[in-house]
Amino acid sequence: MKFNLSYKERIVWEHAKHIFSYVFQVLLFAFLVILLIREFNRALVDSLINVNWFMVVVIIFGALSIFFPIEKKEENKEATKKDLLLIIGLGILGAIIIFLKLRVLGWIGYLIAGLGGLIIVLLSWLLLTEKDTHSDESL
């Protein structure tokens, strides 16, 4: 649905879209860190914050970010060595976290952790190198 907005209203609306997106990204990262800390020290997190209400706030800003997306400009950015090192580092970190939770399973814990880390690396690489082939004009 398109509205006839004045120039100033369009500028304010575009800023609001950026704010929705940025707040969602920050809250999602904080939520994931809190969940990770909660896995290892449940009493600390539960005494400081209600994770369920925090998740509701994250979902609200996520919905705002989806319903009002930022119009991105076409850019062709190639993956750098820094990106590759970050992806591999996060894959290794993810594998370590998975292993810490599944180490009681023995050798299968190693296997699941290794495959989990590999999946993290592959999905991150695919997201980084993805080319957008869809255009909004075809809708």
Image (cartoon, rainbow, N blue to C red):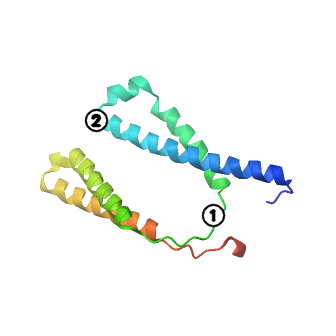
Residue 95 placed where, x, y %? Answer: 26, 54
Quarter holding the C terminus? bottom right
Q: Nearer the viewer, residue 28 or 39?
A: 28
Q: In the image, is 24 to the left or to the right of 8?
A: left
Residue 19 placed where, x, y %? Answer: 63, 46
> Mark 1 highlights which residue?
72
Q: Amino acid at mark 1?
A: Lys
To which quarter of the image does residue 42 belong? top left
Instruction: Tell which tag, 2 or 1, sits nearer the viewer.
Output: 1
Q: Residue at x 65, y 57 (%)?
A: 69
Q: Amino acid at mark 2?
A: Phe
Task: Look at the picture and state if 134 lies above or below 19.
Answer: below
**Residue 46 in sight:** yes
Q: Nearer the viewer, residue 84 or 48?
A: 84
> Mark 2 highlights which residue?
40
Q: Residue at x 68, y 54 (%)?
A: 68
To which quarter of the image does residue 4 belong? bottom right
Looking at the image, tell me whether mark 2 or mark 1 is earlier in sequence order. Answer: 2
Residue 135 placed where, x, y %? Answer: 65, 73
Q: Residues within 10 Å of mark 2 (few under 14, many from 20)?
A: few
**Disc 2 secondary structure class:** helix
Residue 96 placed where, x, y %? Answer: 23, 50
Q: Residue at x 36, y 62 (%)?
A: 82
Q: Nearer the viewer, residue 104 or 125?
A: 125
Marks 2 and 1 close (CB-CB < 8 Å): no
**Residue 120 in sight:** no
Q: In the image, is 34 to the left or to the right of 94?
A: right
Number of numbered tags placed on the structure image: 2
Q: Residue furthest top?
A: 47
Q: Residue furthest left?
A: 106
Task: Look at the picture and state if 85 lies above or below 76.
Answer: above
